[in-house]
Amino acid sequence: MGQQASAPRKGAKFRVIGAGMPRTGTTSFSRALEILLDGPVYHGGTQITIGPERGVKTWLELFSQWPAKDEATEQRNLELIRSQTDGFVAMTDNPCVVLVPELMKLYPDALVICTERDIDSWEKSMDAVTNHATMSFLRFVLFPLPTMRYFVQFIDINRPVWSHLYDETVPPTRKTYNRHIEWLKEIVPPERLVFVNVKDGWEPLCKALDLPVPKDVPFPNINDSKAIDELTKRQVRRGLARWAVIFAIGGVSVTLAVRKWVR
């Protein structure tokens, strides 16, 4: 998860659909794409937590009517997706992973790149992230914070989506991981689908994109687990501090009202 949200850039050409599951190095991958493609990348995990609030609200609207039951709804969903991806050179992480068919329709020239990871470590990592995301008190604590107040709702609405695609919800296991790979091979033409591991550095990614390896630029190595831990703690502290102010103001207001009534 990135430390700051990306802003769209007018005229940027969308070139990569990041189809790798969360916790497969998507943050490092996103940063690598920003360097190679010289433009902003929409990393879902970052944008739905610290990006503009209209972003997460857009995804909530889309998934409330997904999968589309008719052509009109499908067109509306495509419009919603385009409203978030326009101005970016790529999209990665959730919700990108489940919107690959829609993104291929919107961007027929985009390459679908799936980041991979050792399945045992992925399963453990997803379990840890799920524990953070589903803590019941988060819904209350995060409510005063713009964007973050919708985070738990976003996680909740994604459960039926993952169940529909993978017949599994939370916490996801290797069954989900393997089914996702199978699904991509079913829906993406072989010439458009590439698998990479961020541990392999620049070469496989640059080869897929037909771009030269950046000189004297190390491949990004961003610790997603540490970033998620830090973000969770920071946002919980912000939420508690905001509630403290709310309660303090409320207490003062009640006190003043009582004094006025007593007089």
Image: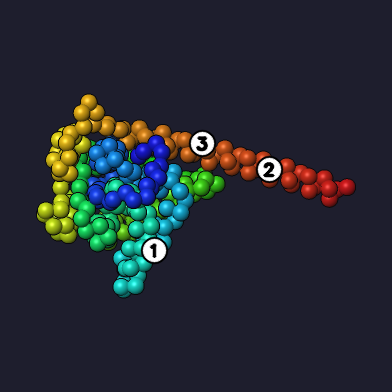
Indicate the position of residue 96 as horizontal and vertical percent values.
Answer: 29, 52
Question: Residue beneath label 2, please?
Answer: 249
Which tag, 1 or 3, sits closer to the chain's start?
1
Which tag, 2 or 3, sits closer to the chain's start?
3
Secondary structure under the numbered disc 3 in the rendered image: helix
Indicate the position of residue 161 as horizontal and vertical percent values.
Answer: 31, 59
Relative height, residue 76 to residue 19 (above, below): below
Instruction: Residue 205: tell me if it is visible.
Output: yes
Relative height, residue 82 to residue 32 (above, below): below
Residue plotted at (34% across, 72% down): 72
Question: Residue beneath label 1, please?
Answer: 64
Nearest the viewer among 99 and 105 is 105
Relative height, residue 72 to residue 247 (above, below): below
Cα gap from disc 1 to disc 2, whole angstroms: 36 Å
Residue plotted at (44% across, 43% down): 50
- The amino acid sitting under disc 1 is Ser
Q: Do the residues bearing badges 1 and 3 touch, measured as CB atoms within 8 Å?
A: no
Classed neighbour count for the residue bearing mark 1: other residues with Cα under 10 Å, few (<14), some (14–19), many (≥20) = few
- The amino acid sitting under disc 2 is Ile
Which tag, 1 or 2, sits closer to the chain's start?
1
Image quadrant where residue 98 sits: bottom left
Question: Residue beneath label 3, please?
Answer: 237
Q: Do the residues bearing badges 1 and 2 touch, measured as CB atoms within 8 Å?
A: no
Secondary structure under the numbered disc 1 in the rendered image: loop
